[in-house]
Image: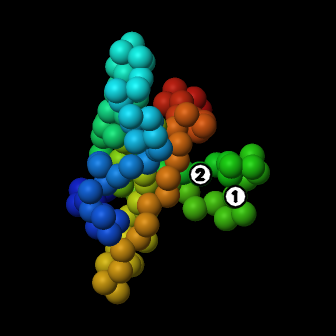
Amino acid sequence: MLDKRQPPLPSSSRIGTLDRTPSLQTSVPPQQLHPEIRSVVSLTHVHAHKVYMSGPLIRRIERLPDGHKPIKDEDWRDVWAQLGGTTLSIWDMKEIDEASKEGKEVPPTYINVTDAVSFFPNQHSS
């Protein structure tokens, strides 16, 4: 059964408010933008910082970013995941348990979901 506890967060502990993408609002003062563009910039900024999901998942890596199979097949792993904007942050629960015994924190793995490919097991295949 998947452990329902939330893993220790990175040292900032404000994961939902981390600045994951450069903000156009900091590079161009809002008053210099055309009014129609201001709303687009504002919505883009809000989207990048919104947390859409946070909770337990199971994960299996079948292909590495270069398309090759992993050297070691680790099967399904319990993870804690948080989707904020287009960034999926993943903490491996086994690594968290080991690190917590030593009083350490585990950094997440970040996945840009706009560049990612996910395959879901077919429940009806044999």
At x 26%, y 57%, the residue is 14
- Residue 125: image x %, image y %? 57, 29
At x 67%, y 65%, the residue is 72
Dot 2 alpha-carbon crowd within 10 angstroms: few under 14, some 14 to 19, many 20 or more: few
- Residue 57: image x %, image y %? 38, 48
**Residue 80: quarter of image:** bottom left
In this rendering, the answer to whether 79 lies above or below 31 is below
Dot 1 alpha-carbon crowd within 10 angstroms: few under 14, some 14 to 19, many 20 or more: few
Between discs 2 and 1, the one toward the N terminus: 2
Q: Which residue is mark 1?
A: 70
Residue nearer the viewer, 73 or 63: 63
**Residue 90: quarter of image:** bottom left
**Quarter of the image with the C terminus in it:** top right
At x 36%, y 29%, the residue is 30
Give the amino acid at mark 1.
Pro
Q: Can residue 30 be seen at all in this image of the molecule? A: yes
Q: Is residue 74 left or right of residue 9?
A: right
Give the amino acid at mark 2.
Ile
Please say if the residues under marks 2 and 1 sit with CB atoms less than 8 Å apart.
yes
Residue pushed farthest bottom? 102
Residue nearer the viewer, 46 or 60: 46
Residue pushed farthest left? 5
Element type where label 1 sits in the image: loop
**Quarter of the image with the N terminus in it:** bottom left
Element type where label 2 sits in the image: loop
Q: Which residue is mark 2?
A: 61
Residue nearer the viewer, 122 or 57: 57
